[in-house]
């Protein structure tokens, strides 16, 4: 009974940590999509390490290389705009944080995680190049990146702000 209570507490802590919205910029449009793709990539990376799916992850990276590079560029631009000279540091913190949170979620899920990961790898494998964002948007973890979505007003003001 005690181990079930501890496991439930660990799951609650892991899920709470993953859904924390950090103070800072909001995201929308291509920036938000790139964060979702990064969340998918991180989920697959953790699954590769935790569930012995390295071949699946390597195939994913090769198959979607152009999309991953494009979304990586979008993320670097977003962090550059929002954090200036600290952009590289903040991007590295972001990537490390989501990897840690993904790993915590995988541990809290237990044995079912690898079953879910296998299904996710199969979904990605069935996706044609160019369709990665559709898969990323439809994952329950897609928006656990920690940035709040921009309101309509915030998006409009960001578009008209001087650069």
Image: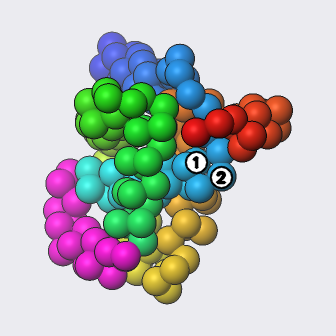
Question: Label 1 to label 2, Cα distance in Å?
Answer: 5 Å
Count of marks placed on residues: 2
Residue drawn 65% across the image and 36% down it = 162
Secondary structure mostly seen in magenta is helix
Query: Which structural element holds mark 1?
Result: helix
Question: Residue 154 occupies which quadrant of the picture?
Answer: top right
Residue drawn 48% across the image and 43% down it = 78
Task: Check if residue 45 falls in the magenta segment.
Answer: no
Q: Is residue 101 visible?
A: no
Residue in the foreground of this view, choosing between 6 and 26: 26
Question: Residue 73 occupies which quadrant of the picture?
Answer: bottom left
Task: Sort mark 2 into few (<14), some (14-19) or many (20+) by Cα contacts within 10 Å.
Answer: few
Chain part drawn in magenta = 48-66
Task: Check if residue 55 falls in the magenta segment.
Answer: yes
Which residue is label 2 attached to? 29
Q: Position of residue 84 (x, y in %)?
A: 39, 30
Query: Which structural element holds mark 2?
Result: helix
Q: Is residue 152 visible?
A: yes
Q: Position of residue 7 (x, y in %)?
A: 36, 24
Asked if the residue under mark 2 is in contact with the one under mark 1, i.e. CB atoms within 8 Å, the reply is yes
Q: Quadrant of the N terminus?
A: top left
Residue drawn 51% across the image and 80% down it = 130
Task: Sort mark 1 into few (<14), some (14-19) or many (20+) by Cα contacts within 10 Å.
Answer: many
Residue in the foreground of this view, choosing between 70 and 46: 70
Residue 11's place in the image compared with 115, above or below, is above
Which residue is label 1 attached to? 32
Residue drawn 69% across the image and 35% down it = 161
Q: Quadrant of the C terminus?
A: top right
Q: Position of residue 47 (x, y in %)?
A: 28, 55
Point out which mark residue 42 bears: none
Whether residue 89 sits left or right of residue 10 in the image: it is left
């Amino acid at each position: 009974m005690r181990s079930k209570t501890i496991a439930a507490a660990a799951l609650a802590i892991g899920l709470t940590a993953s859904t924390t919205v950090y103070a800072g910029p909001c995201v929308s449009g291509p920036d938000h999509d790139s964060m979702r793709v990064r969340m998918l990539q991180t989920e697959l990376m953790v699954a590769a390490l935790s569930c012995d799916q390295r071949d699946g992850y390597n195939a994913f990276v090769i198959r979607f290389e152009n999309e991953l590079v494009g979304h990586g560029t979008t993320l670097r631009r977003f962090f550059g705009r929002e954090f200036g000279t600290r952009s590289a540091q903040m991007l590295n913190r972001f990537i490390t944080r989501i990897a840690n949170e993904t790993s915590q979620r995988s541990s809290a899920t237990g044995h079912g995680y690898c079953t879910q990961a296998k299904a996710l790898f199969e979904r990605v494998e069935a996706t044609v190049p160019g369709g990665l964002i559709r898969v990323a948007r439809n994952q329950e973890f897609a928006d656990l990146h920690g940035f709040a979505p921009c309101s309509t007003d915030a998006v409009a003001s960001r578009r008209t702000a001087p650069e």
